[in-house]
Amino acid sequence: MEKINIYAVSDSLGETAEQVAKAVIRQFDLADFDIKKVSYINDKESIDHLIQKASDENAFIVFTLVVEELRDYMIEKASEYNLDAVDIMTPILFPLVKKLGLAPKNEPGLLRQLDEKYFKRVESVEFAVKYDDGKDTRGILLADVVLIGVSRTSKTPLSMYLAHKNLKVANIPLVPEVSLPEELKLISPKRIIGLTLNVENLNKIRKERLKAMGLRDTANYANMERIFEELEYSEKVMRNLKCKIIDTTNKAVEETASIILDYIAENEIKK
């Protein structure tokens, strides 16, 4: 049997056409075949060139072209050269148009754009987990935003929320007995967000945290004098760093995140 040549053609990367071609070809016991991915076919001249090459190899064409004019032209030219060309998208697209009563966008590369956004979000979430709670201060230099504050000022939930907005966020706890990471002095103050909370609320939150852990709420962690000391230290650090300070008292995570996102947009600090 002669070698089977398949062209997987697209106005974007061509991964969909390629995967369909691979799935179909595996339904046969063929040892000699070649699937060639052809990306970014966006004009008639490119189609002419492709058709000529396919004709020379007597190739089979599988394509995903969202622009109707180019789809029709591909079918027309393939017919002229007596080539088989299969349009993957139209059999699904047209019934949906009829059912939904909506016109398609006819924009190439939308799937790739969605995939890129998804993987960017996953990357940001993984970053937030890796550089949570000062685990690795090297993350400070890599982050879009660094959150600093004493324990229970919503650093971790804010980091995760912002990660889902495609931001790489590191967070650093401020503790009087622990030296400040040197990396904080190496980045722009505009990339640092200081989080604070009033004494009463912080005391209440920490007591609840201790109870949830099965510990007595009289521990030093929830001691008012200790909380005053930590907050005074954190405010001094934030003033020295000249960073933006947000009081998270009675604010939901979404509300604080919105303030941070607006600040980022205003200062264009996202890398």
Image: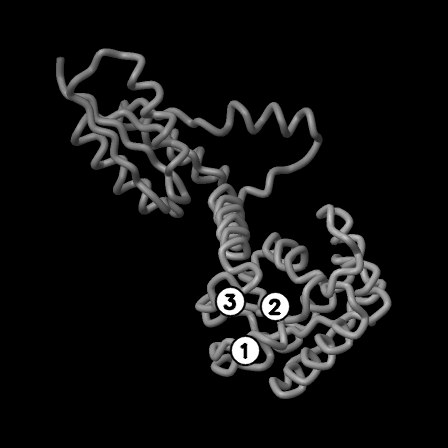
Q: Do the numbered discs 2 and 3 sit on residues whose CB atoms are within 8 Å? A: no
Marks 2 and 3 sit apart, C-alpha to C-alpha, by 16 Å
x, y percent for residue 54: 23, 32
Q: Locate residue 80, reporting x and y percent.
A: 30, 28
Q: Is residue 32 above or below residue 135?
A: above
Color encoding of the figure: one colour
Q: Where is residue 117 in the image (x, y as percent from the top left)?
A: 53, 50
- In the picture, the disc for residue 180 is 1
The secondary element bearing badge 1 is classed as: loop
Mark nearer the N terminus (2 vs 1)? 2
Q: Is residue 16 left or right of residue 245?
A: left
Kind of residue at disc 2? Pro
Tell me the residue at 78%/70% (across/down): 197
Q: What residue type is labelled 3?
A: Ala
Instruction: Say which residue label 2 marks.
Output: 173
Query: Can you tell which mark lies on residue 228?
Result: none
Is disc 3 surrounded by few (<14), some (14 to 19) or many (20+) residues within 10 Å?
many
